[in-house]
Amino acid sequence: DQQVKQNSPSLSVQEGRISILNCDYTNSMFDYFLWYKKYPAEGPTFLISISSIKDKNEDGRFTVFLNKSAKHLSLHIVPSQPGDSAVYFCAAREISGGYNKLIFGAGTRLAVHP
Amino acid sequence: EPEVTQTPSHQVTQMGQEVILRCVPISNHLYFYWYRQILGQKVEFLVSFYNNEISEKSEIFDDQFSVERPDGSNFTLKIRSTKLEDSAMYFCASGGQGTDTQYFGPGTRLTVL
């Protein structure tokens, strides 16, 4: 089941530069997308989300872009900081009978170097 | 800032034993979830719970699994007879009514020997 794909297992970026994390999905019924950040031995921490009716959502250094026709979303982090080093998960919401469950991608490990 | 908490952080058990994983969701949330992540794999949905009943469950959530909200604060996942393949990180999540975001706890690492 590969409904949500993060094709890059890892990404290395220099501090101060832009980090771009990508995510593709196959199910056109997904209506809401979220990015979570995860440190080792911790649970996923919510970062930012976007509804399928929008194409951009911004929160401080984090911006998520959604291209519905391409079934693609990306997370931009500008400027990147060493503390951003973590695994980033893309998740899509699937509504079923009024309740929702999240379908996660495999994650991308971001390393931000000084 | 309110957060989801889970206990224990690590549970080691023998195959065939019962385990109960506990979660305290964010206090005003009404929707509760369990997910798991087997080492090296994706985070997978197990079950959602609302209004004291299961609203959806995945294929993984078979008869060996059950969930309960025994009181106004706790939300538990029980595995009746653990198997080796149940070894994973188990994450509890909760969401408020009308919100789209699920907030996750720190997880319980279950090791079945």
Image (cartoon, coloured by chain):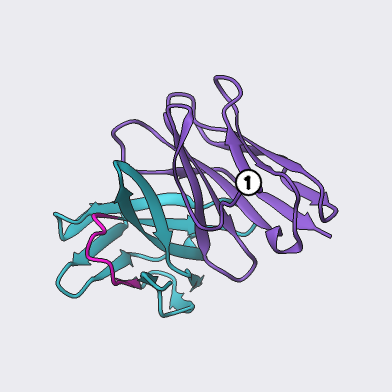
Chain colours: A cyan, B purple
Q: Is residue A25 magenta?
A: yes
Q: Residue at x 65, y 67 (%)?
A: B39
Quadrant showing the N terminus of chain A: bottom left
Disc 1 secondary structure class: strand
Q: Position of residue A78 (x, y in %)?
A: 32, 64
Badge 1 is on which residue?
B65
In the rendered view, does B70 fall on the left or right side of B94?
right
For residue B86, which quarter of the picture?
bottom right
Q: Is A107 or A62 nearer to us in this picture?
A: A107
Tell me residue B110's x, y (percent).
73, 53
Q: Is residue A2 above or below residue A33?
A: below
Foreground pick, A72 / A80: A72
Q: Name the residue: 30% across, 49% down.
A: A95
Where residue B42 sits in the image (x, y, percent)? 52, 66
Residue type at mark 1 is Phe
Q: Which residues are magenta?
A: A20-32
Q: Is residue A114 magenta?
A: no
Q: Nearer the viewer, residue A31 or A41?
A: A31
**In x, y percent, where is residue A68?**
17, 67
Is residue B100 depicted above or below B14 in this figure?
Answer: above
Label 1 Cα neighbours within 10 Å, binned few <14 / some 14-19 / many ≥20: some
